[in-house]
Image (cartoon, rainbow, N blue to C red):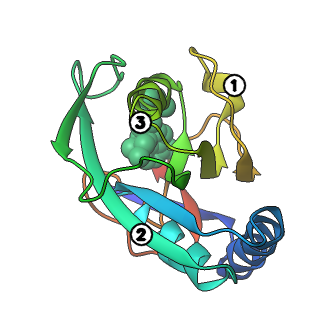
Amino acid sequence: MAERIKVLLSEEEVDRRIQEIGEQISRDYEGKQVHLVCVLKGGSFFMCELAKRITVPVSLDFMSVSSYGSSTKSSGVVKIVKDLDEPLKDKEVIVVEDVVDSGRTLSYLLEMLRDRGPRSLRLCTLLDKPDRRVVDVDVDYTGFQIPDKFVVGYGLDYDQRYRNLPYIGVVEFE
Ligand code: IMP
Ligand code: MG
């Protein structure tokens, strides 16, 4: 099936918002070091851009998870495909995600990471689809709230493509 991508959030809008979040995190964590945890692969573009705009000391780690269940609906039971390299004990951790959709993956993941004893644990997401929420998740930093549409770009994929788009677009099927 052929698809078209319609711009929802331009590169300039996304850049401007990431700058604002970077400044806010820099203020909130003044005098501390933040440890950014990227959820691969979708969170990678956002995390790199965000990290460049944070002015307090930053360390980075990456993890990859897959959710059991059908491909269209996450079950909330998360399998760790690649775990973090570093322990989280006593760190000021911010989990960086591309999008919070049903919230199933994130609520499971955050609980698991909390058990590792970070000093603090916050969630930063580029996109939030509040209409889709099934499980409550506390989001501390949100780039944009968007409607219930399937989007790509800035790390988000459709069938592994379009992650490299420098803007956020809605997939339209022809
Ligand atoms: P959930 O919050 O557990 O439902 O799952 C969120 C995950 O589903 C995200 O991390 C994405 O990998 C994927 N996802 C949700 N909505 C979209 C979308 O609009 N485009 C691309 N991937 C999405
Ligand atoms: Mg994701």
Question: For mark 3, does the 10 Å Cα neighbourhood hold few (<14), some (14 to 19), or many (20 or more) residues?
Answer: some
Name the element at disc 1.
helix
Q: Amino acid at mark 3?
A: Leu
Q: Amino acid at mark 2?
A: Leu
Q: Name the quarter showing ligand 1.
A: top left
x, y (%) of residue 59? 46, 72
The residue most toward the front is: 90
Is ligand 1 within 8 Å of the beta carbon of the residue shown at mark 1? no
Query: In whole angstroms, how far apart are the C-alphas of marks 1 and 3?
Result: 26 Å
User: Residue, x 80% and y 75% (percent of image)?
Assistant: 23
Give the number of the disc on residue 113: 3
Query: In whole angstroms, how far apart are the C-alphas of marks 3 and 2?
Result: 15 Å
The image quarter containing residue 30 is bottom right
Give the number of the disc on residue 77: none
Query: In whole angstroms, how far apart are the C-alphas of marks 1 and 2?
Result: 31 Å
User: Residue, x 69% and y 79% (percent of image)?
Assistant: 15
Taking 121 as reference, is 166 above or below it? below
Is ligand 2 within 8 Å of the beta carbon of the residue shown at mark 2? no
The image quarter containing residue 17 is bottom right
Q: Amino acid at mark 1?
A: Asp
x, y (%) of residue 161? 29, 63
Give the number of the disc on residue 60: 2
Question: For mark 1, does the 10 Å Cα neighbourhood hold few (<14), some (14 to 19), or many (20 or more) residues?
Answer: few
